[in-house]
Image (cartoon, coloured by chain):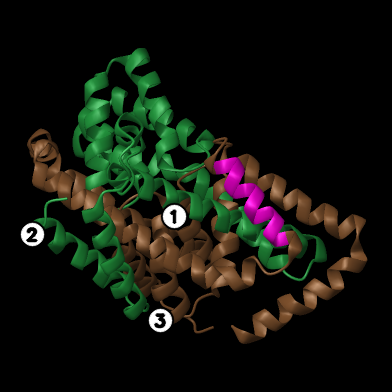
Chain colours: A brown, B green
Amino acid sequence: MKKISLTKLFFIFFKIGAVLFGGGYAILPFLRSEIVEKAQICSMEEVTDFYALSQCFPGLVAGNVCMFVGYKARGILGALAAVVGVCSPAFISIVAVFSFISVIVKYPLVQNIFEILDLAVCVLIYLTIMELWEHSVFDKFTTFIFITAVILSAKFNISPFIIVISAGILGLLRFVLFPKDIKSSKKKQEEGEKDA
Amino acid sequence: MHNILLLAFEYFKIGAVAIGGGYTVIPFLYYLVEKYGWFNVSEITQMIAISNLTPGPIGINMATFVGLKVGGYLGSIFTSIAFMVPSFIIVCTLAKFLKKNKENQYIKNILYGLRPAAVALIAVAGLKILNATCINITKFQATYNPLDLMSLKAFIILAIFALIGLKLKKNPMILIAIAIVTGLVIRL
C-alpha cells in the first residue's frame, strides 16, 4: 500500500462523489476503479467488509464506506478528507440548483436522463457483484447465506441491518460450533486471496 | 440563528440513529415538518426528487436542502456537518478496532459470514432498479401480454450498457457520461 497525501485523498473522493447517483450501493464500482485499482489503498474484499459494516451502523452508507477507506489510508484525518470529499459535490450541487429547483424537477428530459442513469448504475452494480463473487460466495455456507439474504431482503423486505448482523453472527457461530469445517473452506479463502 | 442550531441538533440526532443510508432519513423529515413546520410535505417530495437527480450521497443532498430552506447557506453547512458527525465518530472507532484485531479469528469469521450477505444486499439493490426501469408488473397483471412485462427499449439500452461496461471495466465513470448523453438523445 502506497502512502497517499490527504489532498489527493480528498480529490479522489470528490471525483467519486461527483459521479455518484442513487443509493450507497452505487459507490462500489467507483471504489473498485479509483481506490482498489488506481490508488491501491485496500483490496476489494476489504471494501466489501466496509460496505457490510456500513449498513449496520448509523449514517449514510456511502459516507461510512468512504470514512472506512479514508481511515485505512491515513487514519482519522484520512477519514475526514474522504467524507468531506465525497459529500462536497452533493452539497455544491444542491446549493447551485436550489433557486430554480421546482422548474428542474418537472422537466421530462431531466426525468428521462435519470431513468437512463439508473440503467447504467444497474449495469455497474452487477459488474461489481461479478468481482465480489469469488471472494465472498465460494462454499456451501456462503452460498446459503447469499441465497437466504437475497430472499429475506427482496421478498420479505427485512432490514439490511438485521440481515448483515445475523449473517455475522452465523459466521461466528459456525466457527465456534464447527471449527473442523472451517479449515477446508479457509484454505479456499486463502487461495482466493492469493489470486487477488 | 436559533433555528439553525435547533435544526443542526435535530440533524445530529438523525445522523446518530438513521441506520441504512439516505432514504431512512425521510421519515425523520416528516417528523420535522410536524414538530417545527419549517417546510411542508410537498417540499419533502421535491427534495427526494432533486436529491435523486443531483450527484452525491442522497442524505447530504437532503440535509443541504433542508438547511438552505431553514437557515440559508450557514444553515446548510451546519446541517450537513451535524448530520455526519455521529457516524464519523462511530466509523473511526470501529476502524481503529478492526485495524488492531485484523488477525483475530473471531473477527475473520464474522466477516466471512458478512460478505455473502453484503453481496446479496447489493444484488437486491440492482434488482430493485431493474424492477423500476425495465419491468412493469402492474401493466402485465392488467393485460397479461408478455410484451407489457418488460420495457423493450430499456432492456436494449441495458444490454448495450452491459457490453460497454464489460469493455470499460476499469472506468465506470465513462459509462455514467454515456448514460447522460443517451438520456439527452433517447426518450425511454
Q: Quadrant of residue B80?
A: top left
Query: Relative to residue A125, is residue B187 drawn left or right?
Result: left
Residue A154 % position (x, y)? 53, 42
Q: Quadrant of the C terminus of chain A?
A: bottom right
Residue at image mark 1: A25
In the picture, the disc for residue A196 is none
Q: Which residue is drawn at 57% across and 38% down?
A: A159
Q: Are marks 1 and 2 in contact (CB under 8 Å)?
A: no
Which chain does the numbered disc 3 sit on?
A: A
Q: Is residue A92 visible?
A: no
Q: Name the secondary structure under disc 1.
A: helix
- In this rendering, the answer to whether B173 lies above or below B130 is below
Query: Relative to residue B83, is residue A43 drawn left or right?
Result: right
Q: Residue at x 54, y 36 (%)?
A: A157
Q: Do the residues labelled 2 and 3 touch (CB within 8 Å)?
A: no
Residue at image mark 2: B185
Cα distance in 3D space between marks 2 and 3: 32 Å
Residue at image mark 3: A38
**Which tag is nearer the camera, tag 3 or tag 1?**
1
Amino acid type at mark 2: Val
**Which tag is nearer the camera, tag 1 or tag 2?**
2
Q: What stretch is highlighted in magenta?
A: A142-153
Which of the two residues, B70 or A140, is positioned nearer the viewer here? Answer: A140
The tag earlier along the polypeptide, 3 or 1, is 1
Local crowd at mark 1 within 10 Å, few (<14), some, or many (≥20)?
A: many
Which chain does the numbered disc 1 sit on?
A: A
**Which tag is nearer the camera, tag 2 or tag 3?**
2
Q: Which residue is drawn at 22% across and 40% down?
A: B50
Q: Name the secondary structure under disc 3.
A: helix
